[in-house]
Image (tube, rainbow, N blue to C red):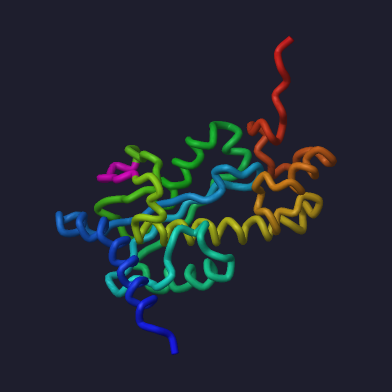
Amino acid sequence: MRGIGPIIAELSRLACMRAIEERLERSGLVPVAGVDEAGRGCLAGPVVAAAVIPGPGPAQPGVDDSKRLTPDEREALAARIRASALACAVCAVPAAAIDRSDILRATRRAMLGALAALALRPAAVVIDAVALPECGLPTLALVKGDALAYAVACASILAKQHRDRLMAELDPAYPHYGFARHKGYAAPEHLRALVRFGPSPEHRLSFARVVPRREAA
């Protein structure tokens, strides 16, 4: 029989993660949205952001920084987050748009797009690390926010799960690269494929590891 200790530990962890949102809500900023991105450091594919306004009910057990979860855990949690949230949305900015600006601007564009797509306007926004003054709302940028704030962790899971699906859908069109396995990150097999086949239309040509910069003579 499973002991009660792990259950109490998980409830305590989730309570700590909700403390930031609850403090904002007690100050009158209701509701609070969490925002995070996935794919910022990839060599191929879009950068994806998600925005989530969690529901008032109990926190979903297992919600955490998406990088700490397995693909199956993310899939299951993403479904529960969507079912329990007051509002949630995702926005993807493709590789070509990243190349036309830069990855930070593209990340902010994805975050703003996700916030704009929410069916409910938040009163405040908690974001993982990225400052977003353009959103026109009170914001709190937290380093490692996806591990510290429940709403941001929910957004982290939705962004990662959505982006992983997009990369798996791209895989049949570009089978040489292994997008379904490494999701566009700089895995050794991905780097070897770039050397052998060159970049695809889904690669970020402004990234030095995709198109190495030549030293000036």
Please give the name of the residue rendered at 39% of the width and 84% of the height, measured from the top-left corner.
Answer: 3
* In the depicted structure, whether residue 103 falls above or below residue 45: above
Please give the name of the residue rendered at 32% of the width and 50% of the height, measured from the top-left corner.
Answer: 126
Residue farthest to the top, as pictured: 217
Q: Quadrant of residue 199?
A: top right
Disc tally is 0
Q: Nearer the viewer, residue 24 or 137?
A: 24
Residue farthest to the right, as pictured: 196
Q: Position of residue 85 (x, y in %)?
A: 37, 68
Q: Quadrant of residue 12?
A: bottom left
Residue farthest to the left, as pictured: 27
Q: Nearer the viewer, residue 98 or 153?
A: 153
* In the depicted structure, whether residue 17 falls above or below residue 84: above
Q: Position of residue 150 (x, y in %)?
A: 35, 61
Q: What range is drawn magenta here?
A: 135-141
In this rendering, position of residue 28 left or right of residue 6: left
Please give the name of the residue rendered at 65% of the width and 38% of the height, measured from the top-left corner.
Answer: 204
Whether residue 140 is in magenta: the answer is: yes
* In the depicted structure, whether residue 40 falls above or below residue 167: above
Whether residue 71 is in magenta: the answer is: no
Please give the name of the residue rendered at 68% of the width and 60% of the height, measured from the top-left corner.
Answer: 169
Q: Quadrant of residue 155?
A: bottom left
Which image quarter holds the C terminus?
top right
Which image quarter holds the N terminus?
bottom left
